[in-house]
Structures are given as C-alpha cells and as structure tokens.
Image (spheres, grey):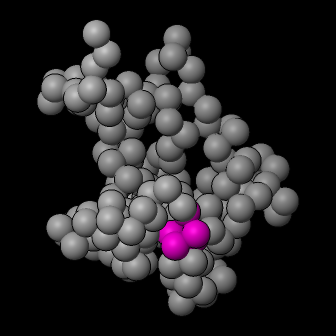
Amino acid sequence: TKMVHLSFEDFLEFVTRLAAVAPLPTDDEIRQGGFEDAGQLILDLRFGDPRAYDAFIRSRAGRWDEPPTQPMERCVEHLLFVLIRTVEASAGNANGDGRLSSREAGSFYQEGTYRDGNAAAATAAAACKRRGDSAVGSAASGVGFKQGGTSA
C-alpha cells in the first residue's frame, strides 16, 4: 500500500537523511559571514548573490553513499534553520527570530508561498538591502567564493 502519512519516527529519519546530503554551511562559515544560523546565510546567498548561491549548492551536493561533511547533529540543526528562515521570509518576516509562530506557519501554508518562491524572494531581497551590500559580500566570502561564484 502507498504510505500517505509518516509516523513521527519516520519523519525524524527523513529529516536526518536529508540533512546528511543537503548543501549546508559549516559553523565556521556561518560565524565568518556574521550570521546567526545557516538559514540566514542560505537566504542571504540565494537572494543577495544568486551566482554564489548556485556555486555553493553545486559544491555541497552530498551523496547517499558518503558520510556527511560535518557532525550529524550540526547538519540537522542547519537544515532546520534553513526551513524555519524560509517559512519566516515567506510569511513576510525577513528579520525573523528563528522561531516559527502559528501565524507564520499558517501564512506559509495558506498563501501557498511554499509553491511560489516569489514572495520569499522579495522579502529576502528587501532584508539584504536593509542590511546593506556588505552582508551579501560577507556571505559570499564567508563560504569561500570569489566574484562570479567560482570556488576560492
């Protein structure tokens, strides 16, 4: 039979397996870029410097048959912050606190912004502009990319 719902244990296994192969920054890269968490760094790259973001994603593609590049607990935390910050930005909270409210989750689901990244893109781009151009540059340099998205 086709499985429609995951048990809690299956959900946790899914998150763990995804975190092991997801293209995620390290703690040092987050700290060097001046970000609070992986979600901030990923959104800043994605909407502030798309070339660097694309290069980052390509360079970090994990494989199922290889161990993760950092401790598993760090991978899971980083993945969860990417998810949280994406929902916050989609709900119009570009300067979120890293904790989802029921309003943010409801807006993300009800508005369908998870299907259409335009709202998230506009909100995240506005956040990058409010922080100034230096935030984008620090994100790109913090993950080791030169101008044009080539690996340093």
Residue 58 rendering spot, x and y as whole percentages: 70, 39
State whether residue 118 appears in this view: yes
Rendered position, 22 above or below 4: below
Residue 7 lies in quadrant: top left
* Residue at x 70%, y 66% (from the top left corner): 49
Q: Nearer the viewer, residue 18 or 146?
A: 18
Task: In the rendered view, tell whether residue 35 sits above or below residue 72.
Answer: below
User: Residue at horizontal 51%, vertical 69%?
Assistant: 120
Q: Main secondary structure of the magenta part?
A: helix
User: What residue is rendered at 19% in x and 69% in y?
Assistant: 101
Instruction: Name the residue rendered at 33%, 75% in the picture.
Output: 96
Which quadrant holds residue 147? bottom right
Residue nearer the viewer, 11 or 4: 4
Horizontal relation, residue 128 to residue 94: left or right = right
Q: Look at the picture and state if 115 lies above or below 5.
A: below
Q: Say which quadrant the N terminus sits in.
A: top left
User: Could you tell me how many numbered marks the image carries?
Assistant: 0
**Residue occupying the far front of the picture:** 1
**Image position, residue 27 (x, y; %):** 43, 50
Q: In this picture, which residue range is highlighted in magenta?
A: 117-121
Q: Position of residue 3 (x, y in %)?
A: 28, 19
Q: Residue 109 location, x and y as percent?
A: 33, 60
